[in-house]
Image (cartoon, rainbow, N blue to C red):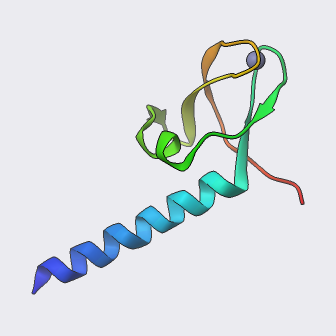
Amino acid sequence: MGHLGAIVIIVIVFAIVVFRSRTTHFECPNCDHSFKVSSLNYIFTLHAGLSRFATCPNCGKGALMTPVGDKN
Ligand SMILES: [Zn+2]
């Protein structure tokens, strides 16, 4: 019986992460380029606290970056 509860929690956490990856972006500390990463990338990348390791598609530099909320 405990299995179903665990699966529900995993699905909810997954949904939150996907939602966050879609509503946030990163800003490169090297060249100020703003970019988004895919949900899968967001989930499996290295992270420390709120920061995540991302590679800038503009200058190719990888760094720990803090997600920034998208402005609508
Ligand atoms: Zn950059």
| Residue at 37%, 70% in the rendered image | 11
User: Would you say 46 lies left or right of 22 here?
Assistant: left
Against 24, is 13 above or below? below
Residue at (55%, 34%) from the top-left corner?
52
Q: Does 13 appear above or below 1?
A: above
Q: Measuring 62% from the left and 39% from the top, which residue is drawn there?
A: 37
Image location (x, y in percent) of residue 25 = 72, 43
Number of numbered discs visible in the structure rendering: 0
- Which picture quadrant has residue 18? bottom right
Residue reaching furthest to the right: 72
Q: Quadrant of residue 66?
A: top right
**View extreme (bottom): residue:** 1
Identify whether 72 is placed above or below 49: below
- In the displayed structure, would residue 60 be above or below residue 27? above
| Image side of residue 71 versus residue 67, left or right | right
For ligand 1, which image quadrant applies?
A: top right
Which of the two residues, 8 or 29, is positioned nearer the viewer here? 8
Residue drawn at (61%, 52%) of the image? 21
Please state, as top left, top right, bottom left or bottom right, where the C terminus lies in the image: bottom right
Furthest-left residue in view?
A: 1
- Residue 43, x across and y down, in percent: 45, 46
Percent coordinates x, y for residue 27 in the rendering: 77, 31
10 relative to 24 in the view: left or right? left
Q: Position of residue 34 (x, y in %)?
A: 80, 33
The image quadrant where one finds the N terminus is bottom left
Q: Quadrant of residue 68?
A: top right
